[in-house]
Image (cartoon, helix red, strand yellow):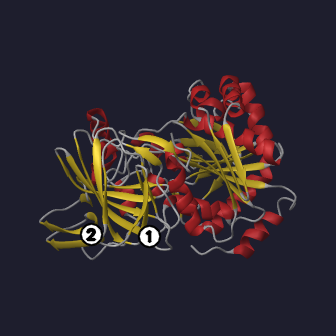
């Protein structure tokens, strides 16, 4: 939905003074299990692109970043997702908002993330600054209603309350937690119910879906954490104090120290604070909210044809009804089927009954147990300098298509077990190969023997595209020794 700046300003300026700061805080992570094979560990749900070309993460950035009085967006995410997140933000950050990041070495659930965010905001902007915590993987259709709900939450949060957003339920959903409420007063939090209980909750009119979105001042959250989960708060403080911080024009990056972060207890903010605190309030709202928790939910975003089929990409159908088919690169042919989900990606295909899409996570778990890369990576992998795509691989060889952004470079590195042939097909490459520095143009190539230090750089103004042929006894991505790296990777 298009932004309505006038409506936003009217809502906000009627509720709090211009001097009060609001920092949208995006929580970006997840395992990528429920929407496999499109989502993976290093390409989780927030990065999935919808039909309009925007990712869920980009939509979260725009929802928070376009609210009045906002001049900075803070994101808590995994260190491995940082450059991917920056790329997504760069596409939509037309206003040039400041972007700050807290980078986790691994997940410690939402309580640790909220604690780190509240500590950072209190230190940078003052303890009375408001945080608006937004999961990166949710979809909100009605942005004006969202703005009204945030304005209401800000008004309540300014009094020292921890405010959660409760979604007015439309169906007896068993996949969400519930909040029993009386107006803005939270009576209790309820776990995901059985269908009978969900029907009862819907009919009573007293229950709301727990959206996982919150609004609070930094001081209010830190005080409640000191009361209800002091171990998490104290351990997070220690970690923040021992972590590396980089600051520049319009950005702050805090890379959490792995050793001290490992000592932070893992718990959700709901269990650690909200279900124990007597300072929690709720804002009931109808904002077109969904957490896109299954392929069925994602498929419902596409318009159906006359037979109830929802198609994204290319599909040939004969006697097919009520199916959702997504195929970005290949044609899918289907005959005589109904009520199925078919998701085609370059390295994996999912076929599932529509009523069983919540069980996709079991396939993800099997892949993870087997150590198969398909739970973690796509064939095309994002790197801070660009992308690489595995075109073909077999015993002792692997062929990649490598794209390097203009002005970007790979690390100065060495491989013990493989040699590499580089063939440039577009752009110009600047190469360090052992003691030699050379330029490699279109239709030219160079050979990197195993054990040679080497670096690839794009000195041009267009993408550098090249084919890399690896050969050797071991071709894993962990066979790399980095000597210099502008991106701070080890």
Assign the N terminus to one quadrant of the image.
Answer: bottom right
Instruction: Answer left or right for 384 relative to 282.
Output: left
Does residue 364 sit above or below 348 in this rendering? Answer: above
- Secondary structure beneath label 1: loop
For residue 443, which numbered disc appears in the image? none
Q: Position of residue 76 (x, y in %)?
A: 60, 46
Q: Nearer the viewer, residue 119 or 452?
A: 452
Where is residue 227, by image quadrant?
A: top right
Instruction: Answer left or right for 118 relative to 194.
Output: right
Q: Are marks 2 and 1 in contact (CB under 8 Å)?
A: no
| Total count of labels | 2
The residue positioned 61% from the left and 65% from the top of the image is 62
Instruction: Answer left or right for 383 relative to 476.
Output: right
Q: Nearer the viewer, residue 146 or 313?
A: 313
Q: In front of the other: label 2 or label 1?
A: 1
Residue 359 appears in the figure? no
Does residue 68 sit above or below 370 in this rendering? Answer: below
**CA gap, disc 2 and disc 1:** 38 Å
Q: Earlier in the sequence, mark 2 or mark 1?
A: 2
The residue most toward the front is 435
Crowd class of label 2 (few under 14; some 14 to 19; many from 20; radius 10 Å): many
The residue positioned 23% from the left and 43% from the top of the image is 472
Crowd class of label 1 (few under 14; some 14 to 19; many from 20; radius 10 Å): many
The residue positioned 32% from the left and 60% from the top of the image is 446
Q: Dot 2 corresponds to which residue?
A: 309
Q: Dot 1 corresponds to which residue?
A: 463
- Secondary structure beneath label 2: loop
Q: Position of residue 367 (x, y in %)?
A: 28, 39
Does residue 118 sit above or below 202 in this rendering? Answer: above
Where is residue 69, by image quadrant?
A: bottom right
């Amino acid at each position: 939905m298009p932004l309505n700046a006038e409506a936003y300003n009217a809502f906000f300026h009627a509720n709090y003074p211009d001097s009060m700061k609001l920092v949208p805080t995006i929580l970006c992570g997840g395992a990528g299990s429920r929407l496999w094979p499109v989502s993976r560990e290093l390409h989780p749900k927030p990065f999935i692109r919808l039909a309009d070309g925007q990712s869920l993460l980009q939509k979260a950035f725009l929802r928070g970043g376009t609210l009045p009085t906002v001049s900075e967006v803070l994101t808590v995410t995994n260190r491995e997702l940082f450059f991917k997140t920056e790329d997504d933000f760069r596409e939509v950050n037309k206003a040039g908002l400041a972007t700050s990041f807290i980078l986790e070495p691994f997940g410690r659930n939402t309580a640790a993330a909220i604690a780190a965010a509240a500590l950072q905001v209190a230190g940078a902007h003052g303890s009375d600054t408001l945080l608006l915590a937004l999961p990166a993987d949710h979809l909100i259709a009605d942005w004006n209603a969202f703005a009204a709900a945030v304005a209401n939450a800000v008004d309540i949060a300014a009094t020292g309350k921890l405010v959660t957003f409760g979604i007015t339920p439309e169906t007896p959903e068993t996949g969400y937690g519930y909040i029993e409420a009386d107006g803005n007063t939270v009576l209790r939090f309820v776990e995901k119910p059985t269908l009978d209980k969900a029907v009862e909750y819907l009919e009573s009119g007293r229950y709301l879906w727990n959206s996982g979105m919150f609004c609070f001042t930094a001081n209010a959250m830190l005080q409640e954490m000191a009361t209800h989960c002091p171990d998490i708060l104290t351990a997070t403080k220690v970690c923040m104090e021992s972590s590396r911080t980089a600051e520049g024009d319009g950005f702050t990056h805090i890379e959490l120290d792995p050793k001290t972060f490992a000592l932070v207890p893992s718990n959700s903010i709901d269990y650690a604070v909200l279900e124990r605190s007597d300072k929690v309030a709720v804002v009931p709202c109808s904002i077109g909210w969904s957490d896109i928790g299954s392929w069925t939910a994602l498929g419902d975003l596409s318009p159906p044809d006359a037979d109830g089929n929802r198609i994204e990409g290319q599909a040939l159908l004969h006697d097919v009804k009520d199916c959702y088919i997504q195929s970005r690169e290949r044609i899918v042919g289907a005959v005589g089927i109904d009520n199925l989900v078919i998701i085609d990606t370059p390295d994996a295909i999912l076929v599932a009954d529509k009523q069983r899409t919540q069980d996709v996570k079991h396939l993800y778990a099997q892949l993870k147990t087997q150590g198969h890369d398909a739970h973690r990576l796509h064939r095309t992998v994002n790197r801070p300098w660009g992308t690489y795509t595995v075109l073909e691989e077999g015993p002792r060889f692997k062929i990649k298509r490598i794209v390097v952004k203009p002005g970007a470079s790979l690390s100065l590195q060495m491989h013990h077990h493989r040699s590499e042939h580089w063939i440039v097909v577009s752009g110009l490459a600047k190469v360090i190969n052992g003691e030699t520095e050379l330029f490699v143009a279109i239709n030219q190539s160079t050979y990197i023997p195993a054990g040679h230090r080497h670096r690839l750089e794009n000195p041009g103004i267009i993408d550098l595209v090249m084919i890399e042929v690896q050969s050797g006894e071991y071709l894993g991505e962990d066979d790399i020794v980095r000597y210099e790296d502008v991106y701070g990777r080890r």
